[in-house]
Image (cartoon, helix red, strand yellow):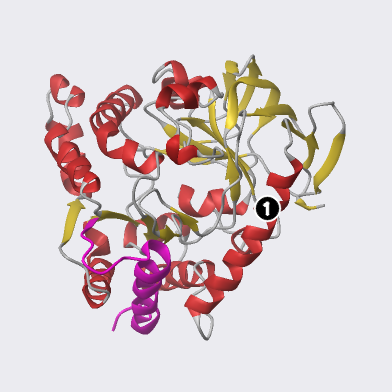
Amino acid sequence: MSAIDQDKLAKLAEVAVRVGLNLQPGQDLILTAPMAALPLVRLVAAAAYRAGAGVVTPIFADEAITLAKFAHGSEASFDRAPNWLYNGMAEGFAANAARMAIAGDNPMLLAGQDPAKVAQLGKANAMAAKPAMTAITNFAVNWSICAYPGEAWARQMFPDLSVEAAVAKLAEAIFEASRINTPDPVAAWGAHNAALLARRKWLNDQRFAALHFSGPGTDLTVGLADGHEWMGGASPAKNGVTCNPNIPSEEVFTTPHALRVEGTVAATKPLAHQGSLIENIAVRFEAGRIVEAHASKGEAVLQKLIDSDEGARRLGEVALVPHGSPISASGLLFYNTLFDENAACHIALGQCYSKCFVGGADLTPEQVTAQGGNSSIIHVDWMIGSGQVDIDGVAADGSKTPVFRRGEWA
């Protein structure tokens, strides 16, 4: 008997297709997932075809094959990635295919591998994926991410439980965070999206020039991009389809100005990145650029990350999440950005979202850059919010308005 409630898993698949993607009749779907998530992939495919999908194309990753490369691959193989695959995905998006990613693999899979090779392979994949990722960061098509409770992930989170008990506990945590444990999950998402819309409308009405974060180890001013727009929850993609990019999601977010970030900031949660855990990140920004970076664990990985390219030391996103969010209230560290970023306010190094500008759908890449948007092959979120962090909105004239007090909306 499965440790995962199959009725709830089927509801998650329906939410992923109907709320996450809002898949349209006749629309194709490109779906990526770890092999461990095959049960959810099958349910998503069925839900997609019930919604009228044209063709559902799953693309799987396998942990053993990934590790085989590190065990036996040549040095040159770490500079190679399947460009043809990403180019094909980009062609699919250009033809209006929707995109879904299912998370669920082992977050610490590469923890024992050479950090230099991990970074080398990550950079090769990021560069190859850029044609496909551009469609996502530009919000060209409806896309979404959800999660499946894979065994390796569950063991990482609950090492003292049996595998079956760990999977069951992770599954329930995913269902709770994804609003599956409600009488009508689709209706629950409708109400949640309305609440997020009210938050982002208030922020857009304020037209803040910057946000100031203050807390233990943090005195950070994040200038906001010219013509920035706050987003969050259900939003329309450029193809006209309104979707929820993240299941779950508790954030409202926008684009910082790549040249206007100053001060120091300390992470409030560990960052799981490419199989390594980076703990107690502390960085200092000058003129928008990280000029000093430290971590108590995984510092070498952090340094490799911010050296990915010129834009990797600058911010591409700032997001507000109340400390009392359901994911924060669970007290769990998921080792997965999809969940952990929705437990706390966060910033992201690297690529910005062009949709987070007024009229963003019509801006050229050059106009996005001119308004302060950052460009990079990476986009990595890490958490800087807690119950001890205050945030003020700073107007163009320097006046301040409380936005968060002790981690909650003010």
Q: Report the side of 51 relative to 302 (left or right).
A: left
* Image location (x, y in percent) of residue 160: 47, 62
Q: Nearer the viewer, residue 405 or 104?
A: 405
Q: Which quarter of the figure is the N terminus placed in? A: bottom left
Q: Residue at x 79, y 27 (%)?
A: 396
Q: In this picture, is 393 found above or below 30?
A: above
Query: Whole-percent x and y of residue 100?
Result: 31, 56
Q: Residues within 10 Å of mark 1 (few under 14, many from 20)?
A: few
The residue drawn where x is 35% and y is 26% is: 115
Which residue in the rendered view is the most extreme toward the right?
399
The residue shown at (47%, 36%) is 354
State the image quarter where residue 301 is shown.
top left
Front-most of residues 244 and 379: 244
Q: Which residues are magenta?
A: 1-30
Is residue 234 in view from this perspective?
yes
- Residue picked out by circle 1: 201
Number of labels in the image equals 1
Say which residue appears at 28% left-offset and 23% top-offset.
Answer: 120
**Residue 325 visible in the shown view:** no
Tell whether 296 sits left or right of 10. right
- Describe the element under mark 1 as helix, strand or loop: helix
